[in-house]
Image (cartoon, rainbow, N blue to C red):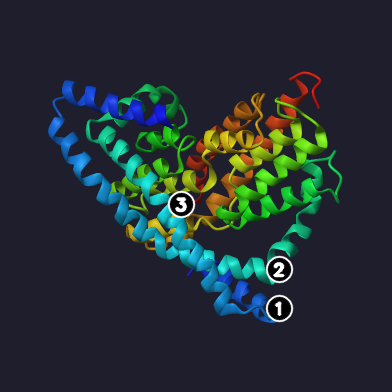
Amino acid sequence: MRYLIFILIIFSYILGVFNDKMSNLSLAIITECSEAVSLSITLCGSICLWSGFMNIAEKSGIVKLLSKVFSPLMRLLFPNISRSSKAMGYITLNFISNLLGLGNASTPLGIKAMEELKKAEGVTDSASDNMIMLTVLNTAALQLFPATIITLRAEYGSITPSDIIPAVWIVSLITLTLTVLAVKFLSRFSGAKK
Amino acid sequence: MSFTDFFIPTIVVIIIAYGFIKRTDLFSTFIEGAKEGISTSLDILPSLICLMTCIGMFKSVGGFGILASLIQPLTDFFGFPEECAPLIFIRPMSGSGALSVYNNIVSQYGADSFIGRVASVMMGSTETTFYTVAVYFGAIKIKNSRYAIPAALVGDMTGWIASVIAVRMLF
């Protein structure tokens, strides 16, 4: 992160000098920060609304119900973890939270799952195949309802902001499938470590 | 009226109806969750201010145009709109950064344009890869992530290309 910020700002300065755009650059420094505030105010309502609904979903047991539905898939992805283990429990809950867009819940659950895997597999400083599978599933963003994107689409005058949902699902599924295949493929070629 | 119009209201009804049947205290449970939402949006504000300023500066001097031209042969090959190229660079690194670039794209080109739709699908179907890998392995002090990054990047690249194809086919 510190590299990203450094590079963006230094390159902006250099480009500004060479392209004679220092006035644009000054304007950007002055105005962009209030733009950030208005963006987060735009999103605040929808974040709160969906956090509220998702809290109901969690407390009423929809999350548990879904984790039963997805247990066959989880066994397919993590064939060598026992179904009743703590790690598998956390992994499933992490997957469901991602699916429902419960960002707040999914990261702590994912980290719990990683800790359990570390305990169970006794690895030291090198990642196990299951750890990589779990992490990579979390980078593949399978999400049923991309609320933030839909809110911003509506904000910028989309007539049917939710019409991208089918496309998001299709792309997410393709991405997830290829990611899983990449993990399975790479694990074959990366030494004997299990 | 299309079936996607049913999507949001149906989710809301299912959640409320299931909660009602299971005798969840709907109002106070909602309030409790919504309150967390406030802290979530406040939590992202400082990083949003920092990254939006950095990205805005970079954009104001034409930096993204230069980045996009670097990978132009590749994006041309897949029919990828160059306006969305900045997302390719920022999306794996920073959530707030990607949000700010996305905000720029839809405000400039419109949410229902081809460019706006591709950007939307990209945002909805990929994640902050490097950040996630760093958090997950960092939390349990794993130093060697082995093939995690290559595998995750395979997924990201698939997502970007598939976004363009999906938007072409569905709209």
Q: What element carries label 3?
A: loop
The first of marks 1 and 3 along the sequence is 1
Identify residue type, mark 3. Phe
Tag 2 residue = A61
- How many other residues sit within 10 Å of disc 2, few (<14), some (14-19) or many (≥20)? some
Tag 3 residue = B171
Q: In this view, does B137 lie to the left or right of A116?
A: left
Q: Which residue is painted at 55% across and 58% down in the image?
A: A145
Identify residue type, mark 1. Lys
* Residue B59 place in picture, x, y as percent: 27, 35
Q: Which residue is painted at 44% across and 34% down in the image?
A: B88
Residue B79 appearing in the image: no
Chain letter of the residue carrying label 3: B
* Residue A93 place in picture, x, y as percent: 70, 54
Marker disc for residue A160: none
Identify residue type, mark 2. Gly
Q: Is mark 1 on a helix, strand or loop?
A: loop
Asked if the residue under mark 2 is in contact with the one under mark 1, i.e. CB atoms within 8 Å, the reply is yes
Tag 1 residue = B22
Q: Which residue is painted at 30% across and 56% down in the image?
A: A38
* Residue B40 place in picture, x, y as percent: 47, 56
